[in-house]
Image: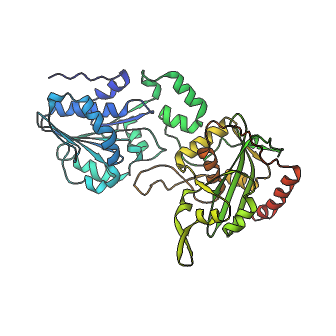
Amino acid sequence: MRITYKLHASQHQVFSDPARFIVVSAGRRFGKTVLAIYKAIKIALEAPKSNIWLVSPTYRQSEMIAWKMLFELIPAPLIKSKNEVKLLVEFTNGSEICLKGADNEDSLRGVSLDYCILDEISTMKRNVFSEITRPMLTDRKGKAMFIGTPKGKNHFWELFIKGEKHEDGFSSYKFKTEDNPYISRSEIAEAKSQLSERVFNQEYLASFEDYTGLIWPEFTQDAIIEPFVIPTNWELIGTLDPAVTGTTASLQAAIDEDGKLFIFSEFYEQNKRANEVADAIKHKASTWYGDPAGKIKSVSRNGVLFSLFDEYSDNGMYLIPAQNDVAAGINRVAEYFKSGKIKIFKNCKNLVHELERYHWSEERETALGIMEPKPYKSLDHLCDCLRYLVMSREEPSRAFKAPVKKFSVEDFERMERQQTQLEESF
């Protein structure tokens, strides 16, 4: 039975390459997973009794995305059997395609492979190929494909460079999102206008960006403004990064009718109890978001465990768990800075101090073994609060009809005096 591979021109370049090791760096929505599955099907049909693996960063991704797609692309008459527990398909010619997850890399050891596709390898541990799947190709002289969107200059970048130099049987390709003719060019243009340059270059141009230096280079002194009296119909929201010991940080912002954030107040104190923090700031914003970790019941009172959220509720501050997707938050704050949608009153000196120093860490591995850039965890309390402000608010903002407290020049002078002692600590 003949099978028609529905690939666009850029996908077909990779599909027809006979190189032993193929590295594909491609932008989002290029069609990487479709290409990977078609390549696996091609190998399975051309080499009877072949053993092929398609490895995703996690087993869950394999199950939810690739497994469904596999059956959409394989004609039913070619399938002899399938095992939904093992995510394994056996073809009528004896070949097998098995889907795997790299989140438990030790479970991948032990079999011989004719072909292995590592999908989104940039987020996998380095040793998934070098120590585990590469030896599994040895006795059958198997081949491999490495495919993904870059995540900094990590092991994926190293493999890509080998392919550019055509070393050790490697061949490399680089495709932009726009190389997929089915993706709207207006959508790409809109993304470019919204995303930070680094994120757009990585996600849409498949560029291997350095995740070093400042996290928000889009922040400039133009974002810092003189305080002014906030209109009464602007929404006021606040965020809190609470702590039992250490630094408790808070930001408050006003939102104008166009959705622009004006950060007018900060709190930044060491070793303060909930009642002390609440007394200092609770009278301003009407809606508060807090670090979701604050809902963990870790504070003991008379033998009963309470959460930091409970402590603040007892003192009149009712916290809503903030949206805490760090990567998405960093990207969205960058978008806001780039488009001029964040303005910071100059009395918020600690926030400015952190923004000028907030940088990437060399540590990239998460608890699940996924590789991704991470912020350096120091001087980041107010930066976290800024993420909460941007991620947790409604979009677009709505203006309240009910009057909200108007701040006078005397209010801001008092806030600035409160910052003096904090500034001296730096």
Q: Is residue 411 above or below residue 393?
A: below
Which quarter of the rendering shows the C terminus? bottom right
Given the current orientation, which residue lies at the most extreme right position?
410
- Is residue 343 at all visible to an observer of this figure? yes
Q: Residue at x 49, y 31 (%)?
A: 205
User: On the rendered image, what quadrant is the N terminus found in?
Assistant: top left
Question: Farthest residue in the left direction?
Answer: 93
- In the displayed orientation, state which residue is furthest to the front: 402
Instruction: Please say if 47 is above or below 223.
Output: above
Could you tell me if residue 169 is visible in this image? no
Q: Residue furthest bottom?
A: 302
Pinpoint residue 318: horizontal percent, then vertical percent. Answer: 63, 57
Toward the viewer: 333 or 169?
A: 333
Residue 295 picture location, percent across and down: 54, 61
In this rendered view, identify the residue nearer to me: 143 or 402: 402
Point 52% across, 48% down: residue = 325
Residue 153 horizontal side relative to residue 424, left or right: left
Protein image colouring: rainbow
Q: Splitting the image into 4 quarters, where does residue 313 fall?
A: bottom right
Q: Residue 132: give x, y in percent of width and height.
A: 28, 52
Q: How many marks?
A: 0
Q: Residue at x 79, y 64 (%)?
A: 424
The residue nearer to you, when weighing 17 against 64, is: 64
Q: Position of residue 174 (x, y in %)?
A: 42, 31
Question: Closer to the camera, 130 or 54?
Answer: 54
Q: Quadrant of residue 62?
A: top left
Q: Is residue 404 above or below residue 302?
A: above
In the shown orientation, is residue 18 left or right of residue 282? left
